[in-house]
Image (cartoon, rainbow, N blue to C red):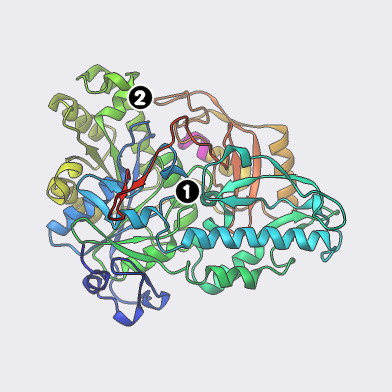
Amino acid sequence: MRPVSEIAGIMGIDPALVIPYGRYKAKISLEAIKTAGPRGDLVVVTGITPTPLGEGKTTMTVGLAQGLGKLGKRVVACLREPSLGPIFGIKGGGTGGGACLVEPQDEVNVHFTGDAHAVASAHNLLAALTDNAAQRGQVPGFGPSMATWRRVTDVEDRALRDIVTGMGGLGNAPIRQTGFDIVTASEIMAILALSLGLDDLRSRLGRIVVGFNKDGKPVTAQDVGAVGSMLSLLRYALQPNLVQTTEGQPVLVHTGPFGNIAHGCSSILADRLAVGYSDYVLTEAGFGSDLGFEKFMHIKARAGGVQPRAAVLVASVRALKYHGGVSLASLDIPDEDAVQRGMPNLEHHIGIVRSFGLPVVVAVNAFSSDAEGELDLVRRSALDAGAFSAAKTTAFSDGGEGSIELAEAVLAAVSQGGRVSYLYAENDSMEEKMLAIARTVYNARDVRWEPAARRRLAQYEELGWGSLPVCMAKTPLSISHQSSLKGRPSDYIFEVSDLRASIGAGFLYPIAGNIVTMPGLPSSPRSLDVDSEGNILGL
């Protein structure tokens, strides 16, 4: 690895605005963000519906950055910070793989610069101040049973999903039912990702709703006197973090909102910083295009982010065979019929991206077990479905050299560009927005609102929140709201079971199916270790 000062030098950032955290990572002052001058082109990286194998979006993002570097382009990648929960759960590390890593991967995955801890501290401070204000009657008409703000932790712990706090009595807090969420599902994490600066962060924190008074009016973080203290914990977490790829390209890793609960994208500030110091910026959106990409367009880009010029859609032969009904144990066996059966999933995701007016390049993440006939079938089918181009990449094994074809395809797509369009107008009603997304993105015939969700919708509309963007909370394992429906489900009713509000972040999130904001550990959690020299093993 190169010292982080050299990576900042490659970008052309003033050394006085680089705040080192050790030798290989640094925070970048917000003063470094350029508001004038040349701007790089933004490319958003998304994928097809995830499978247990993973599609390799982060690996492909890093590999594409390295491929563009091989072509002599100034490039910056923007990624989300990995969460400790999945690292010790099923997923493991979130810094790419093979010859396409974000370095130093051990530090990026574990603790990093402390941003996630700052979010957790600010979130839980707000919970404590809310409970204190409620118990002491400091907000008129607001008591302990009226608080809705939960606490967070950064480990997966199903025992904390629903709990009872307080022992009651004169010296203790009242007994009440509550629970914990994981840090990446915190509204404060989403706020950090969407804030445009310290003043905007202050304003958004103040709008967080922590409960409702006896008249049904919202009680906010501003009402309980928490905003200044929270801001003191988050002031440095607002600064983007600079690291590097295996081949030395700059990477900004900043914020990590969950893609199936929040909007699943890295920060607006990281993108804004990157476009001022590069020819091309690659920014990754979480999960498939039905989640991260749709939210990137409707929430992040509209909230002040940079408009993308093109999109990369990551797919693999193995994933398409899985969508075609092949078991995990048989995915290495050549089977063009299975690839063809799984192709509707890829075709639908191409359609999602194109519906926003962007040219889409399909990145075919190739494995050694893939037959050439299978790879050719994917490329032909992608072009027939309207992709601008489709390129095979061997980035995992060959790094930037294995991504040159993909890099050239992306350059061609960016040069063509597109006119960004949206699926709904900002002033449409929540029901109109939800229906537009359900039909185009989820391929549903209609939307059914359960009674509880409809009651919440009426309440939020009465409070003036009905025109906020939709941030759909649903399974990432299907285009639909049911994880068991693979491929391209059609002619079904999309069911909204509940509706919640993230007023500080600036969106409402309908909930479909059994989405939980506190995951549980699998039967065999991933185990990390440390060798005698202090190196982390098992990432």
Which residue corresponds to the image point at 47% horizontal and 62% vertical from the top-left? 115
Which residue corresponds to the image point at 53% horizontal and 31% vertical from the top-left? 481
Residue 325 horizontal side relative to residue 430, left or right: left
In magenta, the rendered stretch is: 437-442
Label 2: few (<14), some (14–19) or many (≥20) C-alpha neighbours in 10 Å = many
Magenta-span inclusion, residue 249 = no
Residue 355 image offset from top left, x and y in percent: 39, 42
Residue corresponding to mark 2: 323
Residue 209 horizontal side relative to residue 175, left or right: left
Find residue 295 and name its label. Answer: 1
Name the quadrant of the N terminus.
bottom left
Along the viewing direction, whichever of 124 and 404 lies nearer the viewer: 124
Residue 271 image offset from top left, x and y in percent: 37, 63
Query: Against 470, is 331 above or below?
Result: above
Residue 514 image offset from top left, x and y in percent: 59, 32
Query: Against 259, is 491 above or below?
Result: above
Query: Against 439, is 85 above or below?
Result: below
- Give the quadrant of residue 240: bottom left
Identity of the amino acid at label 2? His
Residue situated furthest front in the rendering: 532
